[in-house]
Image (spheres, rainbow, N blue to C red):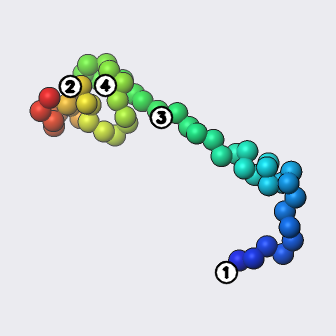
Amino acid sequence: MAVPKRKMSRSNTRSRRSQWKAVAVSTQPCPQCRSPKLPHAACTVCGTYNGRQVIEV
């Protein structure tokens, strides 16, 4: 198991922890209905993916 050789100072610890950020989910407009959808996923409004109907809505 890895064990640190020296104690990490408060400023170094806080600087490292400051990089943990929440990232907003990126969305793309659906090519069929123009509603926002997740990339590489079927549209939840019209049910299409890659130009085909894959989900009955």
Residue found farthest to the bottom: 1
- The dot on residue 35 is none
Q: Residue at x 34, y 40 (%)?
A: 40
Residue found farthest to the left: 56
Sequence-wise, which precedes: disc 2 or disc 1?
1
Q: CA distance from mark 3 to mark 1?
A: 35 Å
Sequence-wise, which precedes: disc 3 or disc 1?
1
Q: Residue at x 84, y 62 (%)?
A: 8
Sequence-wise, which precedes: disc 4 or disc 3?
3
**Looking at the image, residue 39 lies above or below residue 33:** below
Does the residue at mark 3 contact the one at mark 1 (Cβ under 8 Å)?
Answer: no
Front tag of 4 and 3: 3
Q: Residue at x 75, y 76 (%)?
A: 3
Q: Secondary structure at mark 4?
A: loop
Per the image, the residue denoted by label 4 is 30
In the rendered image, residue 11, in percent from the top left (x then y), is placed at 86, 51
- The dot on residue 46 is 2
Per the image, the residue denoted by label 3 is 25
Q: Secondary structure at mark 2?
A: loop
Sequence-wise, which precedes: disc 2 or disc 4?
4
Front tag of 2 and 1: 1
In the rendered image, residue 15, in percent from the top left (x then y), is placed at 79, 48
Left or right for 1, reference 37: right
Per the image, the residue denoted by label 1 is 1
